[in-house]
Image (spheres, rainbow, N blue to C red):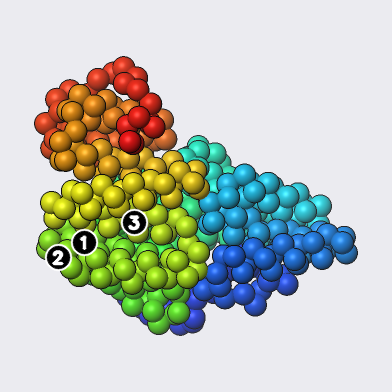
Amino acid sequence: MTQVTQREPAKHKAFAPEYQGALGALSVNSSLTEVLEKGVEELRAAEAAGQQREMARCGLAVAEAYRRLGRITDADAAWKASYRAARSAGDTGAMAWALWSGGTLARQRGALALAYRLLGLAAELGERGGDVVVRGYSLAGLAETGRIQGDYQAVGELHEQLLAEARRRGEARHTVWALEGIAQMHRNTGDYDRALALFEEAAETAGRADDRRGRAWALRGIADVLSVRDGDVERALELLAEAEVTCREMKLSSALAYNQKMRGNVHYRAGLYAQARDDYRQALAGFREMNEPRGTALARLGLAKSLARLGRNPVETAAELARLRRTLDRIGLRHARDMVDKAAAELGVGALPDGDGGTEEEAAR
């Protein structure tokens, strides 16, 4: 694991570079419903005026609002329309931002190969157009895609590079993202002390920069480490409750579902299996509603483990774990696949079957 570059506090308040043109005054803390409402209004005005560049910029905010609200089909149409408008206007930077949005959506949908391709193109266009921010965000997207696949060696240095660039430019939001990504890699490799320090720095940086979204994600990370390292259930649940308030106020559907899944993790580790089961079911419903394959698989894993602890037939548990392993193989999430194998060993269900073993719906009942 690489070492974090020397700490230097971010110089500015967090801002949302994906809110551009007539939407440039929107805050990073604006609720997604507000962003969508204003974005659609300004997009229609730009369309009526035949302003391709403004259509591209407003369309980007609309695409991102749809994506973060879990409206996948609408998000897909919106980023593509933004790209077409940007291309018609000859705006290389806007083209790059649209591709970034499309690549981020692809990762959210579990289409990792497509995410790599779109984010790579976005980074190239950003560099060609001299837009260092979209280039940085696109490289960050590539790094995050590699990280969720468990390819830490390949993306660790890129995370470090992006952290250094974000700090140098005083970009608080990007600094927080990089800190959280590096922290997550340390957490997943068992270096809990380092992970906790980085998550705490991310929360502090986000707080100073008034980045409520970044702080909510950092609090989730702190809660995770306090739970797994110290068994501090009470403090972990307090932090998750604080983060949940932000998620609900800002309509952060994905962050809320991951928060609910983490609450399940905390309860499961404490042996509170009935509470964990309910948490995982709630998270699973949220992930499925927004068509989030990675979150769906992780919530299913937690639910399978909880049901097993509550007396579910081991044969049914093994069948569900086998389905999950195939799903994670298809998505390409190596770290999560290892979690399935560890769960099978932990629960003592024996070798996982190779057959189909029923449907996901049956497994989630």
Residue 10's place in the image compared with 134, above or below, is below
Report the amino acid beneath label 2.
Asp
Location of mark 1 (residue)? 225
Rendered-image quadrant of the C terminus = top left
> Residue 43: which quarter of the image?
bottom right
> Residue 183: which quarter of the image?
bottom left
Residue 265 in the image: x percent, y percent?
A: 24, 52
Which circle, 2 or 3, is nearer the viewer? 3
Give left or right: position of 233 versus 72: left
Residue 62 in the image: x percent, y percent?
A: 66, 59
Give left or right: position of 307 versus 100: left
Residue 34 in the image: x percent, y percent?
A: 61, 69
Q: Is residue 166 visible?
A: no
Location of mark 3 (residue)? 260
Residue at image coords 43%, 50%: 286
Residue 320 in the image: x percent, y percent?
A: 29, 30
Most foreground residue, 97 or 356: 356
Separation (CA) of disc 1 from disc 2: 9 Å
Residue 77's place in the image compared with 256, above or below, is above
Give left or right: position of 229 versus 207: left
Label 2 element class? loop
Location of mark 2 (residue)? 232
The furthest residue to the right: 49
- Give whichever of discs 2 and 3 has the lower sequence position: 2
Report the amino acid beneath label 1.
Val
Give left or right: position of 169 versus 93: left
Rendered-image quadrant of the N terminus = bottom left
Q: Is residue 66 visible?
A: yes
Residue 97's place in the image compared with 102, above or below, is below
Report the amino acid beneath label 3.
Gln
